[in-house]
Amino acid sequence: MISKRGIFMKVIALDLLMLCFSINVSIVGQMFNSIKTSYQLSYSQASLLLSVQSVGGLTLAIISILLIDMLNKSRFLTVCGLLISLLVGLVGTQPPFIILFMIFIGLGFAGGAINTLTNPVMVETVPKNSERYINFMHMIFSLGAVLTPLISQIIYADYGLPGVFFIFGGFASICAGYAYLVFYMKRQKNKVKKDRETKRRIREAFDTFRVQEIRYIFVIAILITSWQLSSIYYISSYFKELSNDGLKGALALSIFFLGMMVSRLVFSKFADRLEAKRVLAVSNFIGAVVWVMIFIVDGFMLKLVLVGISAACCANNFPIVFSKACHAVPEKMAAASGFVTLGYYVAIFVLIPLIGSLGDLVGMRWALPLIAIFLILVIPFANKLSLSNG
């Protein structure tokens, strides 16, 4: 029987691992334009770095769906947290472009592990009111993402690209190190059935995907990723071009994550009381309308406010979807979460670079409003989900 203190320490460890993932995503989003300039790339070429992340992420999704029952999820998580901190630091060495590709594949794999497995491990750690804990964990993601762009821009001014990635890589290693110690303090035997043949695991994975709700969740994951990651990776560049000021671009990204953080913090109090399908449908419709308004209205400050409102509307997409997936197939939570991650990286591989190429052709001012379509398409699939939150 794990003590309340032990449970609390594990919850904090999972929150810190999500913070590592937050640093991975937001630092790349903020430094995307600087990386593009440093390597003299177009938007479409730089977007290939995002695509190769999906190679690692898709590999992780397949492992989660087929093989995760052969591994200890919590220990696998901590190793991936340490891997993220190492790889973030390596980006700061500004390696040859082909090596940078390999690093981004590793970031996709390790980031995918944290994004996928923190959710079922949190459910296992605190099964009662797990929706609240999952939502709060994703709020921690947003908190890290609020601070990272502004801090990274300040560091960049004094120490350049290497300084940004070295410092954040070091901080991530502290967070991952704590999680490593927490989950390794008590060595529990990994109770897995080693005699399960590959064909059986593949059959079980297909059985999981045959669950109608998992299929809807998979499509929703593709759509919400297409909007959210396009926003994260390109909104800073749009505001920088608009103002000719890198700090204002960082401010736009921080406000985006601030809207997400506040929304997730508030929603975590009510996550187990509200109908997830209704929240998804209504919030994504409002978020899409507000997002389009960003590119229509005049006034820099008004645009920033609308960025925060749109992000707040759509902030709970991923916490809701991961929670729904875990509860849709409770006996195969890692596999169910794996299908969310699979959708996540399918979007990164296919649709995010497409938006980047469109930005090269017509500019981000015209390309970014179109991603509101993804939010509108969420609505019919959200309405097909079960009424129960778990």
Image (cartoon, helix red, strand yellow):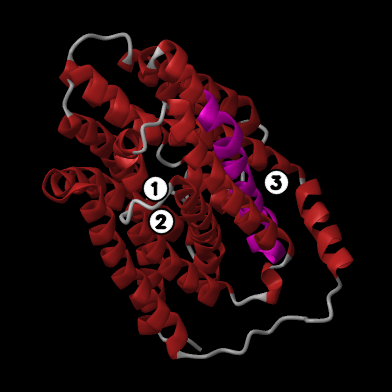
Which residue carries the number 2 mark?
21
Disc 1 and disc 2: Cα gap in Å? Answer: 6 Å
- Location of the C terminus by quadrant is bottom right
173 is higher (above) or lower (below) than 145: below
The reply to whether discs 1 and 2 touch (Cβ–Cβ < 8 Å) is yes
Q: Residue at x 51, y 37 (%)?
A: 48
Residue 179 in the image: state x and y as whole percent: 39, 75
Residue type, numbered disc 3: Ile
Snapshot quadrant of residue 313: top left
Residue 222 position, x and y percent, is: 59, 36
Callout 1 secondary element: helix
Q: Quadrant of residue 383?
A: top right
Q: Which residue is under mark 3?
A: 214
**Residue type (three-letter) at the residue carrying disc 1:** Val
Q: CA distance from mark 3 to mark 2?
A: 24 Å
Question: Of the residues under marks 3 and 2, which one precedes in the sequence?
Answer: 2
Badge 2 element: helix
The amino acid type found where label 2 is placed reads Phe
Mark 1 highlights which residue?
25
**Residue 200 in the image: x percent, y percent?**
87, 66
Label at residue 192: none
CA–CA distance in space, label 1 to label 3: 25 Å
> Which contiguous range is marked in magenta?
328-354
Q: Give the mark nearest the N terminus, 1 or 3.
A: 1
